[in-house]
Amino acid sequence: MNAKRRYTASELRASWTPEKRAADGPWTRYLLRPLAFPTAGFFLAIGWTPNAVTYLSILLCVIAFPLLVIATPPFAYTGFALIFLFGILDCADGTMARARGIPNIWGEWVDALGGYIAYTVTLLGIGAAAEASSPAPAPLPTGTWVLVGGIAAAANLLMRVVYQSFRAVSPDPGKKEVGGEKKLSETIGITGFLLPLSVVGYAFGALHWVVLAYAAVYGGGALLVIFKLVRKVEAGDQVPVDGL
């Protein structure tokens, strides 16, 4: 835990940098971020660290997973609510870190860990919920929608790991190269339209189409990012290095 301090609303909003504003999708900008400011202020006032809030957000996603697997309405909607809370906390932890102004080299890694776990359990969870709630007769064999959810999760993680690995050796060029894909990911991802689309899809018995769409988008996105970065690496490999 950290020393307690109350931050003003203006201090917390000042932590919303132009870079973060540009990266936020509509769901985050107009809903999650406004809710995250008072949430961040609360946790700072009681002495929590940003990493502690990240760990709490991960726990919420882990609890949401079996609720989505059970897939009956009370459990499924509770699972969706926990994922919504994850989105608020995912914005709040960064707000806390920037408001404190204290560098933390591990904070970005912990935040990325939370994102990886959240995407995995959410996409697998909605795949399981789609399996249980798809209209009868089932359009595809049993287990298909869980598999499709797993493909969506794997493709998303692959895209992120490849991108982060490239940034580790070429931070600035890598960031510029995939900026458009990152913006799209923020707009449609777990802190974007994935949750409202999943809730609506579940309510109307169309969640399997949401899972299928995300598997296609993330699968195609992973291939596109890999292709672009391979081309970047190959181009860079042709540049002579002094002394060699």
Image (cartoon, rainbow, N blue to C red):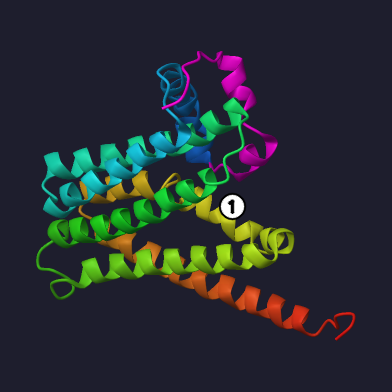
Count neighbours of disc 1 (C-alpha within 10 A) and say few if under 14, some if 14 to 19, many if 20 or more. Answer: some
Residue to which mark 1 is pinned: 183
Q: Does the magenta stretch include residue 20?
A: yes
Placement of the C terminus among the 4 image quadrants: bottom right
- Residue 8 image point, x, y percent: 56, 13
The span shown in magenta is 1-25
Q: Does the magenta stretch include residue 126?
A: no
- Residue 195 image point, x, y percent: 35, 46
- Residue 232 image point, x, y percent: 71, 75
Quadrant of the rendered image containing residue 243 = bottom right
Q: What amino acid is found at the position of numbered circle 1 in the picture?
A: Lys
Compared to 75, does 145 lie above or below?
below
- Residue 109 image point, x, y percent: 50, 51
Placement of the N terminus among the 4 image quadrants: top left
Q: Which residue does the image show at 64% across and 24% down from the upper left? A: 14
Q: Which residue does the image show at 64% across and 79% down from the upper left? A: 230
- Front residue of this view, candidates 225 and 201: 225
Q: Describe the element under mark 1 as helix, strand or loop.
A: helix
Left or right of 3 in this view: 232? right
Compared to 239, does 203 lie above or below?
above
Q: Which residue does the image show at 51% across and 55% down from the upper left? A: 185
Left or right of 101 in this view: 216? left
Compared to 144, does 114 lie above or below?
above
Left or right of 12 in this view: 174? right
Q: How many marks?
A: 1
